[in-house]
Image (spheres, rainbow, N blue to C red):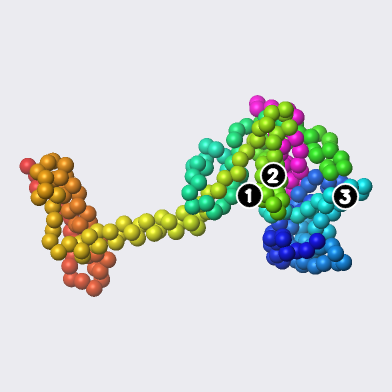
């Protein structure tokens, strides 16, 4: 299997799983240190970031279970950042860039989850929800792909299970409760650099807007010249305030090289 279709390179941080007994169904954070082919098979040398004492492990990227014909991808990207529906910004979809997994609500029976335990994620299904102490009972992925068995886990240690493929990218699988339901959804949100850049650009445009208007006005046109309404007078007053604020800003900006001093005077008492 060729590396050409995979988006991973040496130095990338990814997640990897194993079929080794005792670790089936768990995902580990790893860094790729080497990519190579042996025969027709693709291999990665991986450094386990949460188990540094383990050294470098060589992993066959596509593996088959004994007696099966389908190749199983053993690596995937680091899971997307997690958010909740009630968090600020979750409803925005413009300037799509960063993929985020948004959790709908409290966990329900049948939800497919990943449980953070012993420095890795274990995939399983919610069997029971106990809201009073914010715990659930989960069953890990059954053999031969997981270790099976039931465990108690806390809400805070759970995230939605996700599936990743070259064709579809990240998807949220349907819960196993007899209903066609998902415990989360994937959304595209502006990343922090985009938001920061957009805010700075907006501020610069606001600074330049009064200057452009002043430079372009050969004669000072007033709205009240075309209409004697109160609304026109108010608009003129607001425009004059903007001009004054711009002039004030220019005076303060060049105060080191100017003998001008700007002072605020209180209005005269009536």
Q: Point out the image quarter for the C terminus.
A: top left
The first of marks 1 and 2 along the sequence is 1
Q: Point out the image quarter for the N terminus.
A: bottom right
Residue at the disc numbered 2: 162
> Percent position (x, y) of residue 237?
16, 49
Q: Is residue 2 above or below residue 26?
A: below
Would you say residue 267 sits in the magenta stretch?
no
Q: CA distance from mark 3 to mark 1?
A: 30 Å
In the image, farthest residue toward the right: 67
Marks 1/2 in contact by CB < 8 Å: the verdict is yes
The first of marks 2 and 3 along the sequence is 3
Q: Secondary structure at mark 3?
A: loop
For the magenta stretch, what is the residue range?
111-132
Res 133 seen here: no
The residue at the point 89 percent across, 47 percent down is 68
Q: Secondary structure at mark 2?
A: loop
> Percent position (x, y) of residue 34?
77, 67
Residue at the disc numbered 3: 69
> Percent position (x, y) of residue 21?
88, 47
The residue at the point 35 percent across, 60 percent down is 204
The first of marks 3 and 1 along the sequence is 3
Numbered badge on residue 201? none
């Amino acid at each position: 299997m060729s590396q050409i279709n995979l988006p991973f390179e040496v130095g990338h941080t990814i997640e990897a799983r194993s079929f080794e007994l005792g670790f089936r169904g768990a995902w580990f954070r790893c860094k790729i240190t080497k990519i190579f082919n042996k025969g027709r098979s693709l291999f990665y040398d991986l450094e386990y970031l949460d188990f540094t004492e383990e050294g470098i492990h060589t992993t066959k990227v596509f593996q088959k279970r004994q007696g099966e014909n389908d190749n199983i991808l053993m690596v995937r990207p680091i899971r997307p950042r997690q958010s909740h529906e009630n968090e600020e910004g979750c409803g925005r979809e413009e300037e799509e860039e960063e993929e985020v997994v948004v959790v709908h609500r409290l966990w329900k029976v049948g939800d497919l989850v990943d449980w953070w335990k012993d420095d890795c994620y274990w995939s399983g299904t919610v069997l029971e929800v106990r809201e009073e102490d914010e715990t659930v009972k989960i069953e890990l992925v059954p053999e031969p792909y997981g270790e099976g068995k039931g465990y108690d886990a806390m809400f805070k240690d759970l995230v939605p299970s996700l599936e990743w493929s070259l064709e579809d990218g990240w998807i949220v699988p349907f819960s196993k409760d007899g209903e066609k339901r998902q415990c989360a959804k994937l959304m595209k949100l502006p990343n922090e650099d985009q938001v920061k850049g957009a805010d700075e650009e907006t501020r610069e445009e606001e600074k330049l807007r009064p200057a452009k208007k002043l430079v372009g006005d050969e004669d000072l046109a007033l709205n009240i010249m075309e209409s004697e309404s109160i609304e026109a007078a108010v608009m003129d007053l607001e425009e004059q305030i903007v001009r004054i604020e711009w002039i004030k800003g220019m005076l303060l900006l060049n105060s080191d090289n100017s003998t001008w001093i700007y002072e605020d005077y209180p209005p005269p008492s009536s």
